[in-house]
Amino acid sequence: FDVDEAGTVWVRGRTYKASFSKESATYIPFLGSKAPRNFPVSLRVDSLTIGGEAFAFDAAAPAVRDGAIVEYARGAFRERYVLTPDSVEQTFVFDDLPRRGEVVVSLAVTSELE
């Protein structure tokens, strides 16, 4: 684990690197020593609907690390990344829902990988 001067949290596992900034969470898989370069996959929460209605959230929340967990407190929910040496698991935690209905979290994904 490391934190750079911009506040970005960096993590290195056996099979990946990852960074967590205000803009996005980025996963960089290790594709082997013969890969021509890195192919990062960036994830950003784009929208949240509950029961079909748009719901506001803090899109610019900073990443905070507590042990092997990196979390964004987004107001309406917590976007959580559980880190192990071989994996990164993304979860969404809702302590209280303001209404009942289907919860849909949409992500913007940026990557050159197919």
Image (spheres, grey):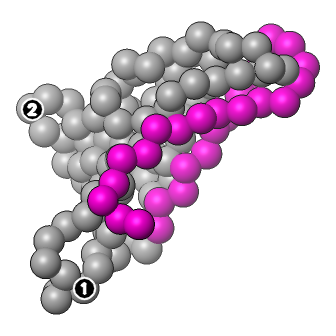
Mark 1: few/some/many CA within 10 Å (<14, 14-19, 20+): few
* Kind of residue at disc 1: Gly
Closer to the chain start, of discs 2 and 1, is 2
Where in the figure is residue 80, as x and y percent of width and height?
Answer: 53, 41
Residue at x 84% of width, y 30% of height: 102
Judge left or right: residue 88 versus residue 33: right
Judge left or right: residue 54 versus residue 80: right
Q: Is residue 88 magenta?
A: yes
What mark, if any, has residue 32 been given in the picture?
Answer: 1
The furthest residue to the left: 5
Is residue 66 visible in the rendered image? The answer is no
Magenta residues (range):
87-114
Give the quarter of the image for residue 85. Answer: bottom left
SS at circle 2: loop
Is residue 101 visible in the rendered image? The answer is yes
Residue at x 36% of width, y 47% of height: 110
Q: Is residue 105 above or below residue 16?
A: above
